[in-house]
Image (spheres, helix red, strand yellow):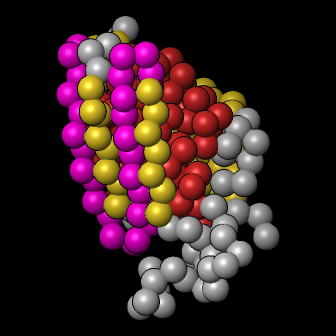
């Protein structure tokens, strides 16, 4: 069974078409009009071994807020739908990723209980033209729409680009682990029998 999902979301601020395959090969084709997010989503796909295809346009003449936020919404929805009933998945994922002087950790529980714990500080308010506060917006919407408990912890680091990149890579690896099928798991990994 293919664990993939395709969606289109159009609002007064953005227009996004997206296809996600959880069991991919790390292929990506990303066009968002926000170059830094394109870079982050490209490596998110590569390090999670997801196939991710995104075509997005938004009101970037204002700023990148709506586009970045709506990308989180769409990717989160695609993750949730691609998982289907969640039967057989590991549910939990944990990844540490170093990036030069930075060490980031991301822990995921695909629990259907959305929460974001975001423990990261960025020394710079911008990376190029990208507002770093939008990283939190992206991950909050991702967690909310994927219905996952997402903990992001940056243990240390002083280069803002490295910190953000390590977060995206760690999230990809943790999500890859959590979405993986374990043949030992029969049904849903919950004593309640439901996620």
- The quadrant of the rendering that contains the N terminus is bottom right
Residue 141 in the figure: left or right of residue 21? left
Q: Which of 109 and 134 is in front in this view?
A: 109
Looking at the picture, does residue 31 appear above or below residue 88? above
Total labels drawn: 0
Residue at the location (74% across, 48% down)? 24
Q: Is 111 a magenta residue?
A: yes
Q: Give x and y (percent) for residue 127.
A: 34, 13
Q: What stretch is highlighted in magenta?
A: 99-125
Q: Residue furthest right?
A: 1
Q: Give x and y (percent) for residue 190.
A: 45, 83
Q: Residue furthest top?
A: 128
Judge whether residue 9 can be spotted in this image.
no
> Which quadrant of the view contains residue 104?
top left
Residue 21 in the figure: left or right of residue 172? right
Q: Give x and y (percent) for residue 177.
A: 57, 55
């Amino acid at each position: 069974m293919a664990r993939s999902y395709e969606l289109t979301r159009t609002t007064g601020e953005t227009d996004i078409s997206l296809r996600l395959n959880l069991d991919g090969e790390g292929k990506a084709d990303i066009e968002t009009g926000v170059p830094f997010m394109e870079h982050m989503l490209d490596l998110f796909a590569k390090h999670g071994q997801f196939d991710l295809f995104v075509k997005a346009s938004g009101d970037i003449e204002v700023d990148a807020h709506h586009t970045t936020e709506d990308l989180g919404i769409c990717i989160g929805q695609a993750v949730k739908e691609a998982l289907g009933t969640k039967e057989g998945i590991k549910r939990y994922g944990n990844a540490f990723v170093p990036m030069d002087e930075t060490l980031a950790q991301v822990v995921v529980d695909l629990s259907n209980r959305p929460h974001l714990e975001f423990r990261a500080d960025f020394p710079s308010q911008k990376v190029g033209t990208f507002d770093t506060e939008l990283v939190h917006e992206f991950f909050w919407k991702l967690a909310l729409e994927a219905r996952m408990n997402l903990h992001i912890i940056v243990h240390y680091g002083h280069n803002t680009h490295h910190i953000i990149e390590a977060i995206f890579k760690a999230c990809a690896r943790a999500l890859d682990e959590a979405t993986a099928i374990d043949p030992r798991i029969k049904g849903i990994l919950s004593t309640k029998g439901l996620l």
